[in-house]
Amino acid sequence: MLTETNKAVARNFYAAITAYNEGDEQALERILAPSFINHRPLEGQTPDIEGLKLPAFHRAFSQIHVTILDQVAEEDKVVDVTSWSLLHTGEFMGIPASGKRISYTEINVLRVVDGMIVERWGLPDEINILRQLGIVSPQE
């Protein structure tokens, strides 16, 4: 039964990211433990809750929609394969807003303790994102 509860916490994590992007400043604090650690922060991103907020990302992208394609849970870990869709509405990595809808997949491993996410390991399809933004050519 705990694995089903943890799966629900993981689903709430993605909803919290969307809510935060839409202006709910406390959305992530409701699902991430104060001791939260992001084990794969991006360059310049701290490995805590504040780092996960990625102000530059949320200024650059809007209309975030996350679909869980597959979800597996065992003990205190939940593994999700997700599909992300977002609108490029602001400058990102020196690339001006394009108005393009960007989509990519991501794998996340979340560790849940007492209904809160305490650790995250994330692996987005970064090359696909960079290709869609025109930062990397399709041949690379």
Image: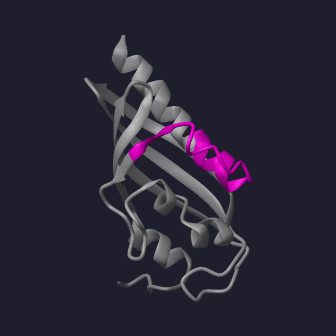
Question: What percent of the width, then of the height, locates residue 130?
Answer: 47, 77
Question: What percent of the width, then of the height, locates residue 43?
Answer: 38, 76
Question: What percent of the width, then of the height, locates residue 129?
Answer: 49, 70
Q: Is residue 119 left or right of residue 48?
A: left
Which residue corresponds to the image point at 73% horizontal and 74% vertical from the top-left? Answer: 99
Q: In this view, does 26 lie to the left or right of 105?
A: right
Residue at the left extreme, as displayed: 75
Q: Give the range drawn in magenta.
A: 15-35
Which residue corresponds to the image point at 35% horizontal and 84% vertical from the top-left? Answer: 140
Residue at the top extreme, as displayed: 1
Question: Where on the picture, by quarter, is residue 29?
Answer: top right
Question: What percent of the width, then of the height, locates residue 66?
Answer: 57, 46
Q: In this view, does 42 lie to the left or right of 26?
A: left
Above or below residue 47? Residue 112 is: above
Residue 73 is covered by the magenta coloring: no
Question: Where on the picture, by quarter, is residue 138?
Answer: bottom left
Colouring scheme, one of rainbow, by chain, secondary structure, one colour: one colour
Question: Where on the picture, by quarter, is residue 27?
Answer: top right
Above or below residue 123? Residue 13 is: above
